[in-house]
Image: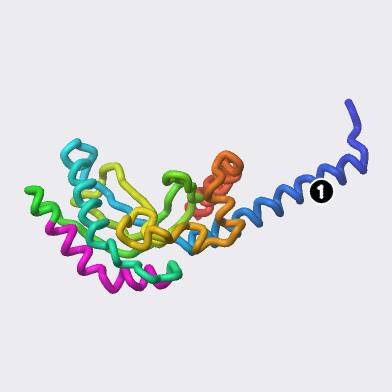
Amino acid sequence: MKIIKKWELCLLFGLVVTILLSNISFAAECKTIRKSVLRLHILANSDSDADQKLKLQVRDRLLKEGGDLFSGLKTEQAARTAAKADITKLQTAAEDEIKKQGYSYPVKVEVAKSYFNTRTYDTVTLPAGEYEAVRVLIGNAEGHNWWCVMFPPMCLPAAEPDKKIEDVLSQNGTEIVENKPKYEIRFKTVELIEGIMKNF
């Protein structure tokens, strides 16, 4: 059996420490990304075709109603404050759309933290973890969900179409969210760690 030399152990230890520090730095950048984004998260009553269709109708209504909600805002905190201030407007719009489509489901619209797995939206991939989100729970909220980024307003076509993700993230953060293939293993690592930590 080959005996590992002292210098080989030192080299291996150095490699492990380098990888660990690199992942800690990456995880810290992911945390900053999560604090810079406000998401929209809509949960359908069930997975039936009718309920999934209703979810999208409510989505379209809320995107229309929230078109100018974040106009001129610079930070996620300001966006969250604006969403909380207009929560009654969003709640009323969701209730009205559900009734308009012939349903009597209750609906709850709130601004709250939600855990998300790593998700891709167009060319942007957001790392796993807890995000502030405008959550819309339709009926039993047991169906497949729909999500997007409300701030910066990537799914609000009427709201400052020139505002992009790089306007609210650092250069490193922008690099991370726009280059999923390069960071795919690291995204999975963060998702695994966050999932474990969530259970403690």
| Dominant secondary structure (helix, strand or loop) of the stretch shown in magenta | helix
Residue annotated with mark 1: 14
Report whether residue 64 is seen.
yes
Viewer-proximal residue among 136 and 63? 63
Q: Which residues are magenta?
A: 77-96
Instruction: Identify the amino acid type marked 1.
Output: Gly
Q: Is residue 3 left or right of residue 69?
A: right
Above or below, comparing residue 73 to residue 1 in the picture:
below
**Residue at figure coordinates x 33%, y 62% from the top left:** 159
Viewer-proximal residue among 38 and 152? 152
| Image quadrant occupied by the N terminus | top right
**Residue at figure coordinates x 45%, y 45% from the top left:** 119
Which x, y percent locates residue 43?
27, 49
Q: Is residue 77 left or right of residue 171?
A: left
| Residue 158 lies within the magenta run | no
Q: Residues within 10 Å of mark 1 (few under 14, many from 20)?
A: few
